[in-house]
């Protein structure tokens, strides 16, 4: 725990090819449990909206408060 938030400990190492599978990405997001998800650098923003209620989709150049 750090600053009142629980930090996950990963028992297995991660290999980063630069792209996570949908399964691994979903696991990471569920484990971290962010308040807001803003997908960037993806061709499939809708996948995030379909899988997570707290997703905010921004258009190019749009700012998030």
Image: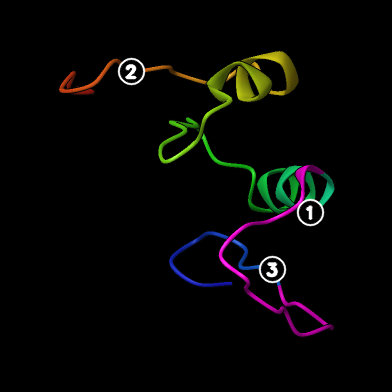
Q: Is residue 37 above or below residue 12?
A: above
Write down the region rendered in magenta: 9-22
Q: Which residue is mark 2?
A: 58
* Residue 20 among those drawn in magenta: yes
* Residue 30 among those drawn in magenta: no
Q: Measuring 63% from the left and 25% from the top, which residue is drawn there?
A: 48
Q: CA distance from mark 3 to mark 2?
A: 28 Å
Q: Position of residue 33 (x, y in %)?
A: 64, 43
Disc 3 is placed on an element classified as: loop
Q: Is residue 15 above or below residue 61?
A: below
Q: Is residue 35 left or right of residue 40?
A: right
Disc 1 is placed on an element classified as: helix
Q: Position of residue 53 (x, y in %)?
A: 64, 16
Q: Measuring 76% from the left and 77% from the top, which residue is drawn there?
A: 10
Q: Position of residue 42 (x, y in %)?
A: 50, 36
Q: Which residue is mark 1?
A: 24
Crowd band around label 2 with a 10 angstrom C-alpha radius: few (<14), some (14–19), many (20+): few
Single out the mark in the foreground, 1 or 3: 1
Residue 49 picture quarter? top right
């Amino acid at each position: 725990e750090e600053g009142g938030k629980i930090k996950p400990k990963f028992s297995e190492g991660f290999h980063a090819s630069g792209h996570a599978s949908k399964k691994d990405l979903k696991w990471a997001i569920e484990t971290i449990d962010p308040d807001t998800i803003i997908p960037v650098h993806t061709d499939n923003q809708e996948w995030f909206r379909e899988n997570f209620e707290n997703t905010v989709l921004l258009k190019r150049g749009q700012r998030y408060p």
